[in-house]
Image: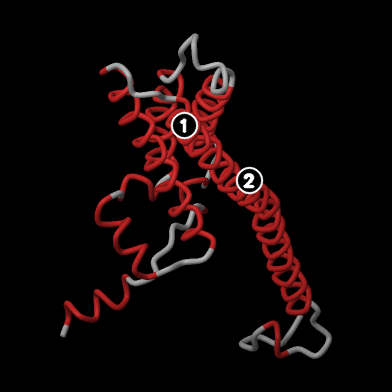
């Protein structure tokens, strides 16, 4: 015991201060370890989610190629002898346009282009989220299925395959957005060109 009036830590033989220091250090190290485990444990899940997002983007490029091929083949097979062929030709042209839009968006996602990004954000802002793009794929999927005809043997099979593939990919986008944690926050759409427009508005 130290003399009366002196603190415990002033006595050379007292070990209470060192014990307190050990306790404090041990507590802080445990907190650091706990923090490291919690932060590191979520990293593989984030990386896995990013891989799924990249895989869906590559799948969208394949879907765009399938739909463009379906639209072009449908146009080639039409003889335009009836009014119904004209309406189906317009439908095939729409399919090619929608496929090109999807492909341009995905290419701009991998390699941002300021002019394309600004145009897409102004006119097709719903594609800049997993849910919006998923519902877009689901909606366009029924265009492919609507192209089915008994007499178009060259397109028969490709229409159903493309329609079901678009429908499945759209459901996959919506499922990833709703059921996978942090999927919406990890999905980073391109912001190329937005900084320039903001600076112009400020000036």
- Label 2 and label 1: CA atoms lie apart by 32 Å
Q: Are marks 2 and 1 in contact (CB under 8 Å)?
A: no
Percent position of residue 83, x then y: 26, 18
- On screen, residue 160 above or below 75: above
Q: Residue at x 53, y 37 (%)?
A: 69
Q: Residue at x 37, y 40 (%)?
A: 132
Residue 55 image label: 2
Q: Residue at x 52, y 23 (%)?
A: 159
Percent position of residue 34, x then y: 69, 57
Q: Which type of secondary structure does the marked residue at label 1 adopt?
A: helix
Of 9 and 104, the residue lying toward us = 104
Q: Residue at x 34, y 29 (%)?
A: 89
- On screen, residue 175 above or below 13: above
Mark 2 crowd level (few <14, some 14–19, many ≥20, 10 Å Cα): few
Quadrant in the picture for the C terminus: bottom left
Residue labelled with disc 1? 76
Residue 88 image label: none
Percent position of residue 51, x then y: 65, 49
Of 86 and 124, the residue lying toward us = 86
């Amino acid at each position: 015991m130290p003399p009366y009036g002196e603190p415990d830590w002033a006595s050379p033989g007292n070990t209470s201060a060192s014990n307190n220091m050990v306790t404090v250090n041990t507590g802080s190290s445990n907190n650091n370890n706990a923090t490291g485990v919690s932060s590191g444990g979520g990293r593989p899940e984030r990386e896995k989610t990013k891989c799924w997002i990249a895989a869906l983007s590559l799948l969208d490029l394949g879907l765009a190629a399938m739909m463009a091929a379906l639209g072009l083949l449908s146009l080639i097979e039409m003889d335009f002898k009836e009014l119904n062929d004209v309406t189906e030709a317009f439908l095939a042209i729409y399919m090619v346009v929608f496929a090109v839009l999807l492909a341009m968006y995905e290419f701009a996602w991998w390699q941002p282009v300021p002019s394309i990004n600004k145009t897409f954000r102004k006119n097709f802002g719903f594609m800049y989220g997993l849910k919006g793009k998923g519902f877009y794929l689901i909606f366009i999927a029924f265009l492919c299925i609507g192209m089915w005809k008994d007499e178009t043997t060259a397109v028969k099979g490709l229409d159903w395959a493309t329609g079901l593939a678009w429908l499945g990919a759209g459901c996959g986008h919506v499922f990833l957005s709703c059921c996978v944690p942090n999927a919406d926050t990890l999905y980073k759409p391109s912001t190329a060109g937005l900084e320039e427009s903001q600076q112009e508005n400020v000036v």
